[in-house]
Image (cartoon, grey):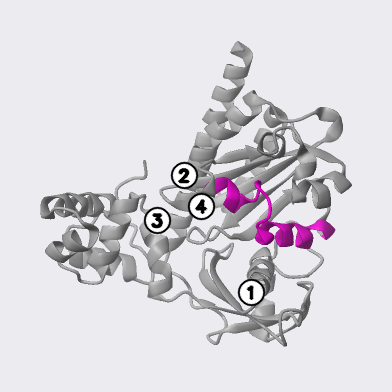
Amino acid sequence: MAKRRDVEREVLGTIGELAASGLPAAELFRALHALLLEPLGFDGGCWHGNDPVTGFPTSTVADGLDPAQFEQAVHLELRGEDATTFSAIRTAGHRVQSVGRATDGRPERSVRYRELLHPCGYGDELRINFDVGGGRWGSAAFMRERSRGRYDLPDLRLAERVAAPIGAALRDAHLAALRSPRTPSPAHAPAVAILDRHGRLRSADAAARELIGRMAEPTDHTGGVPSGFLTVARLAARRGGAAEMRVCTPDGQWLALHASLLDGRHGGAAVVASPVSPLQRLPLAILAHGLSPREQQVALYAVRGTSTKDIAALLHLTVPTVQQHVTAILHKTGVRSRRELVALLMADHLPTLGLPPRA
């Protein structure tokens, strides 16, 4: 037992060092993968950057997995028919879940296990949501071969302990991207890509080809597009219409991806990428500053120009309580007034000066 505690302390210490290093998300994922490979005992795994607001995966770093299975994995995730989808885990109030625990030791009850894990030779899977401050900043899945048995309670406990500091590190990486002034995109017009019904790239304009190259991931997918393109297209197909999500490029540019179906549910999709508007980036800026759920509500009303008295009435709070929340919001964002708060949250980028250090 003592040895296990020593391992946990060493792992958490190294995560703290990695968080302070300022690595881009993809490099951070690779370092974390190598760090957790032996302590968690997995044979293959994938890490995702997420749209913090919707929680949908927007980027992927994988090792030991078959890229040809990626499209099916996205399909199963968005079908929502399994207790171990990332969304289901979060809805159940967990950060961590395994197939073995979710099915009470009967993995065949899991659609994901029957259609993806078992055919690939895996006997169990451990999944983690990196949730901090109301935002889902990333997620990860670790597959274990059947011969190695299922994940046990110490494995799950370690995963629980690493989830929060990894989530905080990813949140800080997002905040760093929001703080950085962006160089204008090479293409001022929206980028347009056409995907077929299987998520494969059919055609793209010059701006989309440039963007797809800029967002190329360490793991090549058979569709030839980044994870975010495939996810938003699959989400539109799932909804039978359109879908939208935010994605951060490796060089720190925030984009909005919008997918619309072509010729019905089975005719593929058009994906349009454009820089996020101030309104689209507002939830990102609020989540990135670590505001509590109630502080987020107050901040949204404050940005709209709602008076303290009206905020109190709308949220069923007292005026002094709203004033306390406003004071906390100003402290966490490093500004001195509501006017500065609006300028901060709605600006093209967040200034680096005057902001308090991250906790």
Q: Distance between the residues labelled 4 and 1?
A: 20 Å
Residue 225 versus residue 351 in the image, above or below: below
Q: What x and y, as percent, mark residue 3? A: 63, 14
Q: Quadrant of the C terminus?
A: top left
Q: Give the range drawn in magenta.
A: 68-90
Q: Residue at left 64%, top 25%?
A: 153
The residue beneath circle 4 is 136
Which residue bears the numbered disc 3?
A: 287
Q: Secondary structure under badge 1?
A: helix
Q: Which of 307 and 93 is in front in this view?
A: 93
Q: Looking at this view, name the residue that lies furthest to the top.
A: 2
| Residue at which label 1 appears | 236
- Residue 85 on the magenta span: yes
Residue 31: x, y in percent? 64, 41
Residue sitting nearer the eye, 208 or 231 = 231
Whether residue 217 is visible to the viewer of this picture, yes or no, is: yes
Which residue is drawn at the image coordinates 76% and 82% (left, top)?
267
Which residue is denoted by mark 2 in the rendering?
A: 168
18 magenta-colored? no
* Residue 65 is at least partly visible in this image: no
Badge 3: residue crowd in 10 Å (few <14, some 14–19, many ≥20): many
Q: Residues within 10 Å of mark 4 (few under 14, many from 20)?
A: many
Q: Going by the image, does 335 lie left or right of 204? A: left
Residue 2 to residue 139: above or below: above
Amino acid type, callout 4: Arg
Earlier-in-chain disc, 1 versus 2: 2
Inspect the image, locate mark 2, and give the three-letter code of the amino acid beneath it.
Ala
Report the residue at 82% width, 48% height from top.
114
The mark found on residue 135 in the picture is none
Residue shown at the point (49%, 39%) measured from the top left: 164
